[in-house]
Amino acid sequence: MKHIFKYLSVFAIVLSVSCKENTSDREASQKLQTEFINQSQIERIEPPNWWIGFQNDELQLLIKHDNIANYTPHISYSGVSIEKVSKGNNSNNYLFIDLKISEHASAEKFNITFKNDSGDELIEVYELKSRQKPSEDYIGFNSSDAIYLITPDRFANANTNNDSPLAMEGQPELLERTIDRTNDYARHGGDIQGITQHLDYIHDLGFTAVWPQPLLTNNMKRGSYHGYAITDLYQIDPRFGTLKEYQNLSLKLKDKGMKLIMDQVANHCGLEHWWMKDLPFKDWVNLQENYEKNIDKWNNDVTINSNHRRTTNQDTYASKYDSDGNSQGWFVATMPDLNQRNPFMAKYIIQNSIWWIETAQLDGIRQDTYPYPDKDFMSDWAGAIMIEYPNFSIVGEEWSYNPLLIGYWQEGANNRDGYNSNLKSSMDFAMQRNVVEAMNEEESWDKGLVKIYEGLANDFHYASPKDIMVFPDNHDMSRIFTQLNGDITNTKMALATYATMPRILQMYYGAEILMNDFEKPGDHGLIRTDFPGGWEGDTKNAFTGKGLSDDEKDMQSFVKKILNYRKKSKAIHDGKTIHFAPFNGIYVLTRSSEDETVVLILNKNENPITLDLERYAEIGLDGKTLRNVISDETIIWKDTITLNAKGVTLLTTKN
């Protein structure tokens, strides 16, 4: 083999001389050095490509190949230099190459040549690309957005050819390939094309962004449909489609003025991840020694699972034992906990996120299980992204009902320990529950609508309340209609409240048609049920309205009216908020900008009630005409208004 490459190298030199008429020596050499490499000679190189023009001019390549640690890499390409080469301490099958990419580097392909002491050579072609747009043009999501969360496997199956794909070239056979729609925890066949084909439906409802659950390969033996046990961080799961289809989804969203948010997981991977069979370092994953000693008889060993004590991130009294149990314990036994304190793992995760932002032209990231990884790393991770993309957005999942913990993770928080997360947004589980309790509880001094009032009163703690994400439900909790005990009026009041308060809004697919999990409340497989009309032969089709009940159609229309008004309302996006303590079973929230005032009225009275408007004089609406966003009727805000039945009223000063 080495003799062939020596011959071809000479041949390339001769050809480069003959090309001087049309191009420079350097350009010809760079082009020709890739012409005789027809396929990759290295098992794996990650990131698989990179770009010129970043603030950070460093790049670390992970090289995976048999005995690659016995090889020395060489690069002869103007503007790219090898700064350092590192070997793993647990396997000879890894090299980590630190590159510096100067501002003079060109966006082209070049060779990385690996040589060992025996004279053997391996050659890998690597590509630097030009970026599609400047960093500042990556505009993230904000309080003007309403985000549609989708479980891709359960939304729509547009391409039945990828339902049971065989092994891809150079990849292991997928462990779970059977489609079984009767099993709530099996694959059902929804895919990327299914989302793309129904963007008109999502857009017309009034949503401005789409957040699919993870679409990367989950090559797990069972329960792989949800996407959170990733086994290849650089590959779209073939059961969902291809990288090209994912990029097309991003493009089609942008054509509609919409955004794509990627669900990422920095805390853990799936047990069947390719590196779990051959870990590069002794500390690549947390509690690795325990895992490697028991790999042949691995099961749900509780000694390796997380204690889920997320408060240890803030607790000044927390023991190291408990803190380590949260940040180093495995989320579950089938999800190895990544050790972000290993600098090579840390760089790998950061580069992976940036690679996807550029490759898919992302508009935001939702980061799973935010309080579980090493919190100093998470600050570095978010900081590295925001340095490159100053207008980008990231939201972190902090499943806590304590506003102190939610606020801790938001950038700009006045934390006692000085911690700065660099995270623009966290998720408002506290307000999610407050609204549900407000609807379900009987009215009293400390129950019912006061839960919303006092919940919003906690906004003084947040660095930027409007940049926090609120939601009626998500893929991990009962559907909002279930949480509200099947009460349609309460569901409408709740949805309107989430949509009007100073927050980013996220809704889970199917909330608009009263999807529920009444049969087994809280069961994840049932929560993530198939969207009607997403499969050929469905008797009910929410995309067209076929087979929907009157209540389902009415809720769909209600959501459409609320969200399409919200889409253009500056008062809801950025307006001043004033609300009034609940009185006689009524809560009033107002949002005001220079030319618009929006008034949300929640009424829990079953019988007609007259509202004395003098109580609300400070919002300055006396004598003005307001339009009801839901019914399109108009009223004069003067003296009193009568509310004829329990429910929500949403008024605006705009025609």
Image (cartoon, helix red, strand yellow):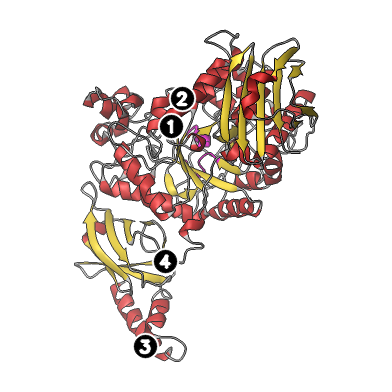
Mark 4 vs mark 1: give the one in front: 1
* CB contact under 8 Å: marks 4 and 2: no
Mark 3 or mark 4: whose residue is earlier in sequence: 3
Residue type (three-letter) at the residue carrying disc 4: Glu
Mark 1 or mark 3: whose residue is earlier in sequence: 3
Q: Which mark is residue 127?
A: 4
Mark 4 or mark 2: whose residue is earlier in sequence: 4
Asked if residue 31 lies in the magenta stretch, the reply is no
The CA span between labels 2 and 1 is 8 Å
The CA span between labels 2 and 3 is 73 Å
Mark 4 vs mark 2: give the one in front: 2
Residue type (three-letter) at the residue carrying disc 2: Asn
- Looking at the image, residue 331 sits to the left or right of residue 603; the answer is left
* CB contact under 8 Å: marks 2 and 3: no
In x, y percent, where is residue 371? 37, 32
Mark 4 or mark 1: whose residue is earlier in sequence: 4
Residue type (three-letter) at the residue carrying disc 3: Val
Tag 3, which secondary structure? Answer: helix
Q: Which residue is mark 2?
A: 458
Q: Residues within 10 Å of mark 2 (few under 14, many from 20)?
A: some
Q: Which mark is residue 79?
A: none
Q: How many marks do you count on the picture?
A: 4
Tag 4, which secondary structure? Answer: strand
The CA span between labels 4 and 1 is 43 Å
The CA span between labels 1 and 3 is 66 Å
Mark 2 or mark 3: whose residue is earlier in sequence: 3
Magenta-highlighted residues: 212-227
* CB contact under 8 Å: marks 2 and 1: yes
Q: Which residue is mark 3?
A: 14
Tell me the residue at 29%/45% (across/down).
Answer: 279
Q: Quarter of the image holding residue 641?
A: top right
